[in-house]
Image: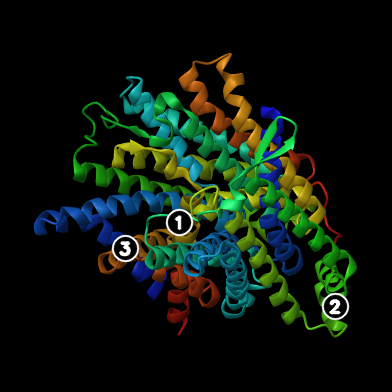
Amino acid sequence: MKLQINLRNVVVALVAAGLVLLPLYSQLSGNIFILTLFTRIIIFALAAASLNLIMGYGGMMSFGHAAYLGIGGYAVGILAFEGIGSGFIQWPVALAASALYALVIGALSLRTRGVYFIMITLAFAQMAYYIASGMSRYGGDDGLTIYKRSNFGGLIDLSNRVQFYYLCLGCLFGGIYLIWRIINSRFGMVVQGVRSNEQRMQAIGFHANRYRLVCFVISGTICGLAGALLANNTDFISPAGMYWTRSGELMVMVVFGGMGSLFGPVIGTIFFLVLEEVLSQFTEYWALIMGPLLLLIVLFARGGIMGLLGRFSRG
Amino acid sequence: MVLVEQSLNGLQFGLLLFLLAAGLTLVFGIMDFVNLAHGSLYMMGAYFAATFTAWTGSFVLGVILALGATLLLGIVLEFVALRHLYGRDHLDQVLATFGLILFFNDAVRLIWGPAGLALPLPAWLTVPVQIIPGVFYPAYRLSIIVVALAVAALLYVVVMRTRIGMLIRAGASNREMIGALGINIKLLFTLVFGLGAALAGLAGLMQAPILTVQIGMGENILILAFVIIVIGGIGSIRGAFLAAIFVGMIDTLGRAFLPDLLRMVLSSAAASTAAPALSSMLIYLLMAIVLVVRPEGLFPAAKR
């Protein structure tokens, strides 16, 4: 694949460089707030990127992605609560639990299409939400405080802001690299083929749903990782973090950036969360602007930010 | 005795859910439009009713004004924003109306403040009524059942027996065709949307005296309404009615009796947190089973 120099790639490169250099700026200017803000942004960008894998490339509109954030987070939180602080146990459990959940609900949900798929993934995520709020041992509705972040021996200290930031960034870049490899592999081509024309893919001998399901599970697993990171970031996990509006926000981040573009979700997440932050500086009622803006973007800018940039670079 | 009372509560909740789901399923079935902001209209109905009742000092007058206001709001909303989304991808509709939810929640917070409102009932609605010897039931809840049943019957007559209803049904089965036959679809759509909004508003304002009027009150119940129309089959009013009663019953009876059942196997504290979660889960489980077994819902409307 040959890299082209156009506006889109330049913006992506600048954003990536900016993310890498951010702790340096934070250190020099003494602005710690921006580091915590962007740690959060990077974690959500990872979640959005995983959603983009199935939404943008697989054509599966999952309205329940927040469930994985919760499952990954609760895996870390519950193990920490029970006295197992090692990240080498917590994180694999978080990933495995997310993958298992994705496997079960994927196998059921993929029997449906279109708007029914949106609804059934939403319903399963709400079910997970109610399970979480029913776990009285782990705080129920009030959530669970995580007193100690995951312990990776001497390898990395998650309580150190800069180290944690780079860990999150590494996960994000790793996740995007993985997604890039997937969509350019034979497997990814089949998944995209199924999105464009399922019947034709079936006719030439691909078991469409099996490919879809594997893609769904990969996406869920990556999002579970984001959940484990998020729980470590906030030192807290509660059912509210997996409420359906969170799933909606993840969808918004993907669409803001541009569905089906590799870096789109990162740009979209930065845009969404920074805008939220900036607007809430001016007014308490930031959603009063965000809501109609979302409506306008859906109506007039369907490709999101990446789509707009692409349009400009073509002239 | 408790069983009778709880069954009536279940019926009442189910009927409220039906009012919400009926508008949703009409809009969904006819315009193929997923409207997440339906829950916001439910919330607005409650807020309007609380405000107008406080202004006029009369519950009945407040309710009538609130119904008119939600109808108007629905029509304006359809005219300004939503009609541009017909024929678009479902994802676009989900996102755009998700934006509307954000907007409405903050607009309400700006206008009415973050604290909830109360909608006090007039004295004649607070007395308990003896329904069968020895069983008393609040008059207000009883009147919800009566009003909702009347509205359901009216809706049935309108949809099945009138010319407008015929057009609505025709629109649900083939949109292009009735357009080609010279029916003003745009007007019909606006009308149906306004009707759906008024029904949602009615559900909201009737629920308001039982719960408090608060921001986000429409969101949880909206998901339930979606579950109902998916179980019932999108576009089917009959399906929505049956599924709504069913879901209302499961939810209410589950909340009422599951704690006692669970206490037999769990500690009492664990049972009282697990029970509401479990009864909420039952509904989603039911939906999942229905979708897996009959992906089109129990009573699918006529195929396009």
Report how far apart the C-alphas of labels 3 and 2 lie in the structure: 47 Å
Q: Which residue is drawn at 81% across and 67% down?
A: B172
Q: What element carries label 3?
A: helix
Depth order, front residue of A173/B67: B67
Report how far apart the C-alphas of labels 1 and 2 lie in the structure: 40 Å
Q: Residue at x 59, y 37 (%)?
A: B280
The crowding category of the residue bearing disc 1, from other C-alpha atoms within 10 Å (few below 14, some 14 to 19, many at least 20), is many
Name the residue carrying label 2.
B178
Q: Is mark 2 on a helix, strand or loop?
A: helix
- Chain label for disc 3: A
Q: Which amino acid does label 1 sit on?
A: Ile
Depth order, front residue of A90/B88: B88
The crowding category of the residue bearing disc 3, from other C-alpha atoms within 10 Å (few below 14, some 14 to 19, many at least 20), is some
Viewer-side label of 3, 2: 2
Image quadrant occupied by the C terminus of chain A: bottom left
- Chain label for disc 1: B
Report how far apart the C-alphas of labels 1 and 3 lie in the structure: 25 Å
Question: Would residue A77 be visible to someone looking at this image?
Answer: yes
Question: Would residue A1 be visible to someone looking at this image?
Answer: no
The quadrant in which residue B7 appears is top right
- Chain label for disc 2: B
Q: Which of marks 1 and 2 is nearer the N terminus?
A: 2
Name the residue carrying label 1.
B215
| Labelled pair 3, 2 in contact (Cβ < 8 Å) | no
